[in-house]
Image (tube, rainbow, N blue to C red):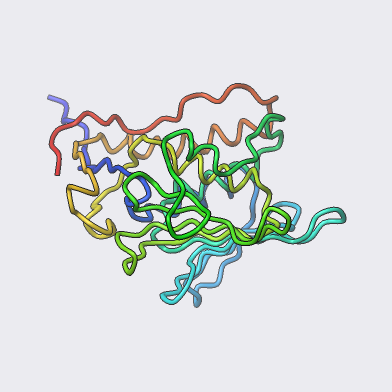
Amino acid sequence: MPSSPETVEVDFITPRHLAGGGDPAWITVPLHRACGWSHGHDPLMPRVLLSSPDQKALLRLEPDPAGQWWTLSHAAEPDKPAWYASFGARTPVELIGAVTDALTDPAPPADALSDPYMPLRQIGWSTASTDNGLASPDNTAFVSRLGSVEDPGAWFVTAALAQNRPVWQARFGEHTPARLVTAFTAALADPKPVHRIDSGRSIPTRDPNIVTRQTTDVRADLLAGALEERVRSLAARQATPPTSPAPSRQPPANKRRSR
């Protein structure tokens, strides 16, 4: 009698900005395998460096307890200044991946949104009381931009459980293309849960009034297949004209129990 497929216990978590960082391979593997980014190898250093084929962009993943773990930088071009974006350790990889996906898109849509606030306003985010930015309805996420309309500055996105309990922060330099910041805020606004294995190690709170965890058993091959399908989907962009994006494949979130 054939054995049952191996399964893994998976947590599906909302809101996604409080799900923990996730697996860095969600970002690094597609950049290398689908987008042609090259990587260095230094076994004595706990870091990952990936550079774009044109050597203009560099993604650095380096554990830094006192600062940002992810840094994406882009060199200046004749008509554009240099820019950067950085992300704290617990920034969900799905949000960072949205930025790298937009950056590596060989044919970004002509009607790409350029107002990072728009995806958030569309789901009910309101003006924050402390600054000119926006706050999520549960007051656990905030987006703001320094400067003024005449002289705009850097963008800051912060997830926090309280004013003195920050979880992560994303920063986008003043010259970061607006479509990349919008890709991040659109992913932040997405109501779909993200999946985590053994989320107890990374989830910033288990308070059921703040975070919802639905746990189910998922076949291990389906879980691995989600990353492989992501790689294939991004690789296909390099070889074919842009089409309407297919729905992303995620492990089935058949609820077994909630925590």
Q: Residue at x 12, y 24 (%)?
A: 1
Q: Nearer the viewer, residue 237 or 194?
A: 194
Height in image: 128 above or below 188?
below
Q: Residue furthest right?
A: 78
Q: Residue furthest front?
A: 129
Examine the image and state in which quarter residue 193 appears. top left
Q: Nearer the viewer, residue 40 or 64?
A: 64
Is 24 situated left or right of 201 in this image?
Answer: right
Q: Nearer the viewer, residue 148 or 214?
A: 148
In the rendered image, which quarter contains the C terminus?
Answer: top left
Q: Residue at x 55, y 25 (%)?
A: 245
Where residue 150 appears, as percent x and y from the top left, is 73, 55
Where residue 248 appears, as percent x and y from the top left, is 45, 30
**Number of numbered callouts drawn:** 0
Where residue 208 appears, as percent x and y from the top left, is 17, 48
Height in image: 239 above or below 105?
above
Is 211 situated left or right of 194 in this image?
Answer: left
Is 231 situated left or right of 148 in this image?
Answer: left
Where residue 251 appears, as percent x and y from the top left, is 32, 33
Examine the image and state in which quarter residue 227 appears. top left
